[in-house]
Image (cartoon, helix red, strand yellow):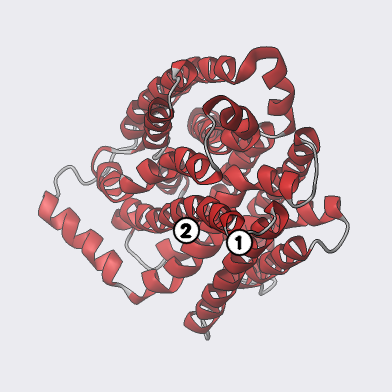
Amino acid sequence: MNLWLRVFLPFATGYYFSYFLRNVNAVIAPELTRELGVSAAGLGLLTSAYLLAFGAVQLPLGLALDRWGSRRVEATLLLVAAAGCALFATGHSLLELAVARALIGLGVSACLMASFKAFGQWFGTARQASLNAAIMAAGGLGALTASTPLSWAIPAFGWRGVFAALAVAGVAVAGAIFSTPEKPGGTQGESLGAQLRGLADVLASRAFWVYAPQSTVIVGGFMAFQGLWAVPWLMHFGGLPREAAAHHLLLLSTGMLGGFLAIAFGVGPLSKRGVSALRLLQVGMGLGLLATLLIVLGVGPADPLWFAFGLVFSVGNLAYALLQAHFAAGLAGRVNTALNLMVFVGAFIIQWGFGTSVDLLQAAGHAPRDAYQITFAGLLAVQVVSWLGFLVGTRGSK
């Protein structure tokens, strides 16, 4: 219990903070569009600056985590996130807000990967999948908070007031992370050349390229949609007001949170019954794509469908533990951040590309509703191809 309070809780709080910041723009998108007068593509670029900065540092982040440990790296970077929140609260131009968003992405870039590494050190690899899911549940709670509860707060405090409060919270979370106990280990004695060779081995492995494509397109696509385009989709395709759209985002986030909790407590018992984590990932991704198809077609009861949409895609985090099992423990930071890089590259391209596609289709004469539907359908087609490739690549594995 002491380790849960001193190690798990601070890192879980950090990931809650990170996930809230990832999704906050989905709810404040109407205010940003109104104040800045930007197009859908401009809004996508502004929001995805977070993803670009986040993804760009993943490989050096893996080296840093393996060299200096989770506590120092994450606490230091969270101070950068706090500075980004302060700049976002005071910024007035698209450039200022994009820079602020990039600083936030850089600052929270270690929150999940540092947690994965710390849990492997303190709790052992046998509990890795369950603990990974438990901290993803903390992130799901952050996503849930950045939906309907945030939409209630904006009229009272404004989006600038929200970001000012987040700047203060970032400093507090950094202090909590830095106060966690130090675990001996790391690669301080390993040369940079040796670290880079280890990273090269990860990137050259077949296992990495079995998991990377589906994580890039499916998990990255879900992240891009949840983080920005869910609310505009519901407003333009579904004709809903912002509060009702935020309610659907709340359902999605609640489903995702429930899925993470189910994985955290259920993956062990299921494995004893012969249902492996890999099988859960394969089937869960397939069900997620089915839910996506129903949303694209506008078929089915909306509330249960959006809950299920978040629920089934929660299995995507299992890829980290499954891929990490193919490598030595000393490579954990580099394995996780290399895969995370692919996820965030996918999320950045899809988040920006989604808005660009909507703009181009509308310029070609399509109604906004049709432009959103065509764009989402095209994304789904690419995701299905990547899932089928993953099934082929893992055929025969358990």
Comparing 235 with 303, the one in front is 235
> Which quadrant of the rendered structure holds the N terminus?
top right
In the figure, is residue 104 to the left or right of 283? left
Comparing 232 with 172, the one in front is 232
Residue 197 in percent (x, y) is at 17, 61
Mark 1 residue type = Thr
User: Which residue is at 43% across, 49% downward?
Assistant: 120
Residue 45 in percent (x, y) is at 45, 43
Q: Image height check: is 352 above or below 151?
A: below
In the figure, is residue 39 to the left or right of 241? left
Residue 332: name its quadrant. Answer: bottom left
Whole-number angstrom distance, CA of label 2 to CA of label 1: 29 Å
Tell which circle, 2 or 1, labels the residue nearer the N-terminal end.
2
Residue 79 in percent (x, y) is at 37, 23
For mark 1, give the secondary structure. Answer: helix
Label 2 with label 1: CB-CB less than 8 Å: no
User: Which residue is at 65% across, 58% downward?
Assistant: 371
Residue 1 in view in this figure: no
In the figure, is residue 207 to the left or right of 382? left
User: Which residue is at 47% across, 81% downward?
Assistant: 393
For mark 2, give the secondary structure. Answer: helix
Residue 216 in view in this figure: yes
Mark 2 residue type = Tyr
Q: According to the image, label 2 marks what residue?
A: 320
